[in-house]
Image (spheres, helix red, strand yellow):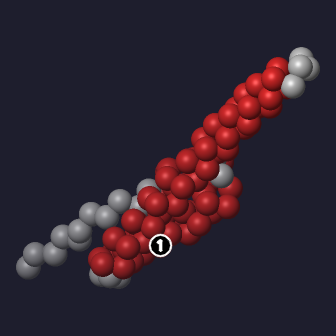
Amino acid sequence: MTIPSQAYVPNHLVWAILMTLFCCLPGGIVALVYASRVDTLVATGNIDQARDASDKARLWCLLSLLTPILGILAYFFLMAMGVGLSVLAGGY
C-alpha cells in the first residue's frame, strides 16, 4: 500500500513574518493570515484552496515590500521638488 504524496505548495510564512516586522505591518498581517492557512489546507487535501492562499500570501508580501519603497521614493521626490521650488522663488 502506497501513501499518496501531497503536492508541494509554498506557504511564504518566512517572508510574511519578515514583511510584518520590517516593512508594512497591516499588509504583513494579512500575508501572515494567508500563509498560515496553506499547510492546513494541504493537509486536509484542499490543494486548490492552498494554492490560492499561497498566491494571496505572496501578493500581500509583495505589496508590503513595495509600500515603504514607494513611500521613501515619494518622500525624496517631494523633498527635491520643495528645494527646487524654494530656489526658484529666490529663497534658500
Residue pictured at 55% horizontal, 48% vertical: 66
Residue pictured at 27% horizontal, 63% vertical: 8
In the image, residue 12 sits, relative to residue 2, either above or below, namely above
Residue pictured at 67% horizontal, 61% vertical: 26
Mark 1 lies on a secondary structure that is helix
Task: Tell me, yes or no, if residue 34 can be seen here.
Answer: yes
Which quadrant of the view contains residue 80? top right
The residue to which callout 1 is attached is 37
Task: Tell me, yes or no, if residue 19 can be seen here.
Answer: no
Residue pictured at 60% horizontal, 58% vertical: 28
- In this picture, residue 19 sits left or right of residue 43: right
Please identify the quadrant where the C terminus is shown. Answer: top right
Q: Nearer the viewer, residue 37 or 53?
A: 53
In the image, residue 46 sits, relative to residue 76, either above or below, namely below
Which quadrant of the view contains residue 49? bottom left
Q: Position of residue 35 (x, y in %)?
A: 48, 65
- In this picture, residue 38 sits left or right of residue 80: left
